[in-house]
Amino acid sequence: MQVVKYMFQPHGDERGQLVALEELKDIPFRIKRVYYMYDTVSNVVRGQHAHKTLEQILICIHGSCKIKLDNGKEKKEVLLERPYEGLYVANNMWREMYDFSSDAVLMVLASEIYDEEDYIRDYDEFIRFVKSVER
Ligand code: T46
């Protein structure tokens, strides 16, 4: 399984850094939604689900956290700790977010609006779903 990380271009000058993200240019899909999580309690694991169609880019714009990606066959762990790097999370991918630093702000750019019907929250169902779309 290939982990796809985007390195965004910071526009730095003597005042500091600025990162600009445009859909279909820096981000490989049209951005329909942005959300972010902060004040994450230590030792919690977020996520623990997959999406049938949703694609996302995860950016830890402050602090750090780890992401586990699982495509049903392979698992990979990714550390996000730079505000100019984005992790692409495809559909049909189980994801878990954990080891949040106390100052972590995890921002997510999403290809679709919020739809609870798109979630697969049961791991066995996820494995069945992945096998069914592979056929
Ligand atoms: C994902 C990972 C990376 C909304 O009302 N609108 C939204 O757009 C979202 C994302 C959430 N919510 C509500 C639904 C729940 O009552 O916010 C609450 C927390 O959501 P959830 O438990 O799904 O959060 P995470 O951190 O487990 O997962 C989220 C996204 O839901 C998910 O799509 O891929 O971040």
Image: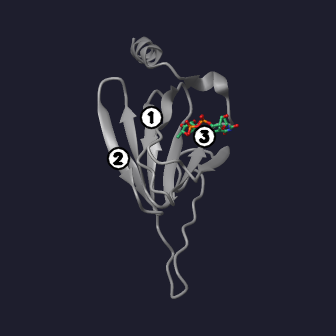
In the rendered image, which residue does mark 1 sit on? 95
Place of residue 20 in the rendered image (x, y in percent of width and height, measured from the top left): 57, 65
Q: Residue furthest front?
A: 42
In the rendered image, which residue does mark 2 sit on? 78
Q: 50 left or right of 99?
A: right
Place of residue 50 in the rendered image (x, y in percent of width and height, measured from the top left): 49, 28
At horizontal 53% and vertical 22% (from top left) the residue drawn is 121
Specify the quarter for ligand 1.
top right
Q: Can the viewer see residue 2 in this picture?
A: no
| Above-or-below relation of 61 to 51 | below
Amino acid marked by disc 1: Arg
Q: Quadrant of the N terminus?
A: top left
| CA–CA distance in space, label 1 to label 3 | 16 Å
Q: Earlier in the sequence, mark 2 or mark 3?
A: 2
| CA–CA distance in space, label 2 to label 1 | 11 Å
Place of residue 96 in the rendered image (x, y in percent of width and height, measured from the top left): 44, 36
| Above-or-below relation of 11 to 107 | below
Q: Earlier in the sequence, mark 1 or mark 3?
A: 1
Q: Nearer the viewer, residue 121 or 103?
A: 103
Number of disc labels = 3
In the rendered image, which residue does mark 3 sit on? 111
Count residues near mark 1 (Cα–Cα under 10 Å), then give few for <14, some for 14-19, many for 20+: many
Amino acid marked by disc 2: Val
At horizontal 59% and vertical 49% (from top left) the residue drawn is 37
